[in-house]
Amino acid sequence: MVDSHLAIGDDIIAVLRVIYSLFIIKKLNSLNHKINMKPYIAELIGTCIFTLVLILATAANPWVATIFAVFTLMFLGYGFGHVSGAYVNPALVVGAMFVNKISPLKALYFIIAELAGAALAVLVIKYSGVATPAGMESAFSWQLFSAELIGTALFAYGVATVAFG
């Protein structure tokens, strides 16, 4: 029982450190210019919602997950698009950065917020007792990582060129 409480505490501390890094970056850069934190908080919340929906929908059925992903992205686009752009994906942030729609510093803030949001969603799933899809805890594979990296790069390039011309 004590070990599980320590694991929960360690996980929560790790997520809080990532979130706190947003505020450290804000404090360090506040000497140069004022940073509006609303877009980064919106990305954190949006990515958390998107990750939760995908994990829960995938547990039901992959086809259901696809439909839920589309509707969740529509909801997030309408809800957070005017605040942050509703990227909810670091690949899209990198694509927007490469076509000069956001600065590299702003991209870094977005990516930190999105990673914190995804980690928060995983913690919610992990400690809520909800069953996760089989294979989610599988071992790391360089082949899968390479395929995901190439696919993500092509996806980000395609979205950036369509969305930003």
Image (cartoon, helix red, strand yellow):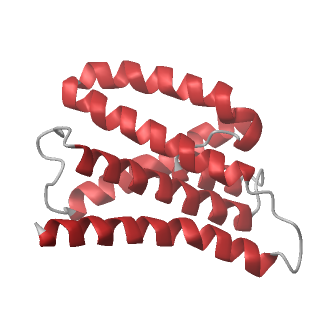
Residue 90 place in picture, x, y as percent: 53, 53
Residue 18 place in picture, x, y as percent: 50, 68
Relative vertical location of residue 126 with respect to residue 161 in this rendering, above or below: below
Quick check: 155 left or right of 107? left
Quick check: 108 left or right of 141? right
Residue shown at the point (60%, 47%) measured from the top left:
43
Visible residue check, residue 165: no
Visible residue check, residue 89: yes
Quick check: 130 left or right of 91? left
Quick check: 5 left or right of 163? left
Residue shown at the point (29%, 32%) measured from the top left:
56
Residue shown at the point (21%, 67%) measured from the top left:
5
Quarter of the picture holding the C terminus? top right
Number of dots carrying numbers: 0
Relative vertical location of residue 140 with respect to residue 48 in this rendering, above or below: below
- Residue 109 sits in which quadrant? bottom right
Viewer-closest of 56 and 65: 56
Quarter of the picture holding the N terminus? bottom left
Residue shown at the point (16%, 38%) measured from the top left:
131
Relative vertical location of residue 78 with respect to residue 116 in this rendering, above or below: above
Residue 130 place in picture, x, y as percent: 20, 38
- Residue 11 sits in which quadrant? bottom left
